[in-house]
Amino acid sequence: MRGRVIGSVLVLLVLAMPSFAQRRRATGPPPPQGGGNNNPPAPAPALGGPVAGLTAAQQQLFNEGRDEFREDEEVVDGLGPIFNGRSCVECHNAGAPGGAGRRTVTRFGTVTNGAFNPLTNLGGSLLQERAIGPREGSPRPFTREIVPAAATVVARRRTPALFGLGLVDATTDATFIALAQQQAARNDGTAGRAALVQNILAGMRTVGKFGWKNQNPTLFQFSGDAYLNEMGITSPHFPDENCANGNCAELAFNPAPGLNDGGGEVQALADFMVMLAPPARGAITADVTAGEAVFTQIGCASCHVATLQSGASNIAALNRQTYHPYSDFLLHDMGSLGDGIAQGDAGRNDIRTAPLWGLRTFPTFLHDGRANSIEDAIRAHDGQGRASRNRFNALNATQRQRLLAFLNSL
């Protein structure tokens, strides 16, 4: 940890700008992007690289954030007492830092009087499966969490990819609300809804965009949440340590009490994610083009929306850009595919539509990593995805081959 400290953030900026803009202005006008009459289009950034056209100051912030993303935390930095990983890249690593991963985490809870109970008094809903001890440099061995006997709902969550999410962060709430309204007007049984969750910096509820349940509205908040709940690093907006299975008495022996990060590391992680480029498309062949037509015909594009547009940003590559995530970033009732966990504004069966860009780099599929192939993932769809699943099952061999060619180009 570098111990950087950031100043206070103006709430008005939260709703209009990505997290980089919450800290400082760009230091100069955006450079030319290419693609005009005299300039060829700029080559796509390498996987795990920054978006094109950063200023020198922005590039430095991206590099610092990438270093923070890769860094192993130590007890002296505030690691633990309970945690799931020592660095971000320990989990987000498929293809490049920021990628998806095979690593899953556990969430648990129960149902009380028909409502989900996250069993926060027993350490829920997220389980921290590791704890610091002499091996990590703590004189006291702390107790790692286990799923308590009271839990009747246990779910796994796969590590998602982070590529391109700065574009999503820069997309206005109104875009997602309008998209949900458009889907509802179709009246075809697949309409998603925008999650409204507490935005810590704004002091109000705004649209959730990040996490399998859309539980976080910004990459800044996503960073602080993960820093605390996956690594045990406290920060100004996430100041309270987790207690192993609810036993807060152990915190009296915490070797790094108080705030572990003044806010600089959380901001650095957010900067890295905001400026992390989206994955480039693979080769677009005739089969790929035909496969996208099949994708639309069987209804996949109803939720996996191909094209969105970002709002205003002082990062040129994020400013009012058309992008292709193949997601609506809305919550959908997935029936039996849901994980049984209510979180934020999401119900037990709700799952955010997973963006499909970068799909060819994913080591496993679906929110819990249960599927080892794209075909298995499609066949597991239920709820609002059931009709598309059934249409997929009815495809002939040629149609299926073309569809998979398209999906493997993403």
Image (cartoon, rainbow, N blue to C red):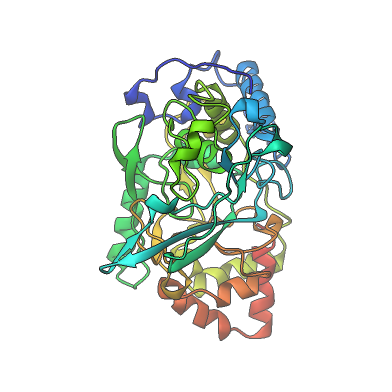
In the image shown, does 292 or 276 lie closer to the viewer? 276
x, y percent for residue 72: 70, 34
Q: Is residue 74 rendered to the left or right of residue 165?
A: right
- State whether residue 219 appears in this view: no
In the image shown, does 87 or 288 lie closer to the viewer? 87
Who's the residue at 35% across and 37% down the image? Answer: 199
x, y percent for residue 65: 63, 28
For residue 87, above or below residue 399: above
x, y percent for residue 206: 32, 41
For residue 379, above or below residue 24: below
Q: Is residue 64 rendered to the left or right of residue 211?
A: right
For residue 156, above or below residue 383: above
Q: Quadrant of the N terminus?
A: top right
For residue 228, above or below residue 158: above
- State whether residue 76 appears in this view: yes
Q: Is residue 180 rendered to the left or right of residue 296?
A: left
Report which quarter residue 364 is drawn in: bottom right
Who's the residue at 37% across and 69% down the image? Answer: 190
Seen from this angle, which residue lies furthest left?
113
x, y percent for residue 16: 37, 30
Who's the residue at 49% across and 17% down the image? Answer: 6
How many labels, in total? 0
Who's the residue at 38% across and 51% down the image? Answer: 121
Q: Quadrant of the C terminus?
A: bottom right
